[in-house]
């Protein structure tokens, strides 16, 4: 049964227009942040990555990188909670032979209907909207192929720029590196690696439209990463793990 917050999240994403969401990633600082996330996607590709699943496809930000950097034999599927986002990506990537199927699915409550076992699954900035995110991680392990790789992210509860997650529109969950490590080990994941690369407030990324200011913002992030390490006080925790 859906909780009140899950239902609110679902309605928010169902009503959000894809063009409006895509616009939010066009600011120069957000594009630089996106490039780091996408480079992480590429760097975690397994040697064999024929069967790929992107969860929370949005307007295709990650799909685009998966298409570009996967092998010619890759078979890519995607899901999103929003029918609008799925329809947008179906039109955007019509004719892309690597894209096999894009469907509407709420991973927090729906059955994932694909019959395939996936070599690589991405769930970037998605699981935080599910109160049962731990159970979702168990569900995703079930659809991974042996030695398959999962790449996902969760907000860090110890971020120095943590802001109230409830905005009247949606609600998200937070965790910590230790909780993530313990949760994944208990589920049965292995070769777990956790990192992060942004500590400054998200609002700064949304408002930094000038290239010079954006470069300074990312430079400050690099200094903080050098001083504080891979995860300490980062805003978003990115996790790579294997079945």
Image (tube, helix red, strand yellow):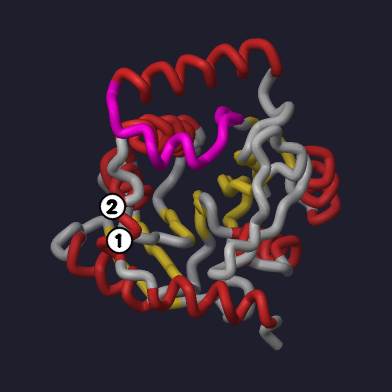
Residue 47's spot in the image, x, y percent?
47, 35
Camera-side residue: 240 or 1? Answer: 1
- x, y (%) of residue 141? 66, 59
- The answer to whether the residue labelled 2 contacts the one labelled 1, judged by CB atoms less than 8 Å apart, is yes
Residue bearing mark 2: 23
**Residue 18 shows up from this direction:** yes
Q: Quadrant of residue 32?
A: top left
* Alpha carbon separation for disc pair 2 and 1: 5 Å
* Residue 27, above or below 121: above
Residue placed at 41% from the left, 42% from the top?
206
Q: Secondary structure at mark 2?
A: helix
Q: Going by the image, does 186 lie left or right of 154? A: right
The outermost residue toward the left is: 95
Assess disc 2: are there few (<14), some (14-19) or many (≥20) residues with their C-alpha within 10 Å of its C-alpha: few
List x then y, in percent, for residue 98. 26, 56
Q: Is residue 133 above or below residue 22?
A: below
Mark 1 crowd level (few <14, some 14–19, many ≥20, 10 Å Cα):
few
Residue under the image location 38 percent in, 61 percent down: 58
User: Residue at (18%, 68%) from the top-left corner?
Assistant: 91
Say whether residue 175 is left or right of residue 171: right
Give me the residue at 37% from left, 70% from top: 16
- 38 or 71, which is in the foreground? 38
Which numbered tag is attached to residue 78?
none
What residue does disc 1 label? 20
Magenta-tinted stretch? 197-211
């Amino acid at each position: 049964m859906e909780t009140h917050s899950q239902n609110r999240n679902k309605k928010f994403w169902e009503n959000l227009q894809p063009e409006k969401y895509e616009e939010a990633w066009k600011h120069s600082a957000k594009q630089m942040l996106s490039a780091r996330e996408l480079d992480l996607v590429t760097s975690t590709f397994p040697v064999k990555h024929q069967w790929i699943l992107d969860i929370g496809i949005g307007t295709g930000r990650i799909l685009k990188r998966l298409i570009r950097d996967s092998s010619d034999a890759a078979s890519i599927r995607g899901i999103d909670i929003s029918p609008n986002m799925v329809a947008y990506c179906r039109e955007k990537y019509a004719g892309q032979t690597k894209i096999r199927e894009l469907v509407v699915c709420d991973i927090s409550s729906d059955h994932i209907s694909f019959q395939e076992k996936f070599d690589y699954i991405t769930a970037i900035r998605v699981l935080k909207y599910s109160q049962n995110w731990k159970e979702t991680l168990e569900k995703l392990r079930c659809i991974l192929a042996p030695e398959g790789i999962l790449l996902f992210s969760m907000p860090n509860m110890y971020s120095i720029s943590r802001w109230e997650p409830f905005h009247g529109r949606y609600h998200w969950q937070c965790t910590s590196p230790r909780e993530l490590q313990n949760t994944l080990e208990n589920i049965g994941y292995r070769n777990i690696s956790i990192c992060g690369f942004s500590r400054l407030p998200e609002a700064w990324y949304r408002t930094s439209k000038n290239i010079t200011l954006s470069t300074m913002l990312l430079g400050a992030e690099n200094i903080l990463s050098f001083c504080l390490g891979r995860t300490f006080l980062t805003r978003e925790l990115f996790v790579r793990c294997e079945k």
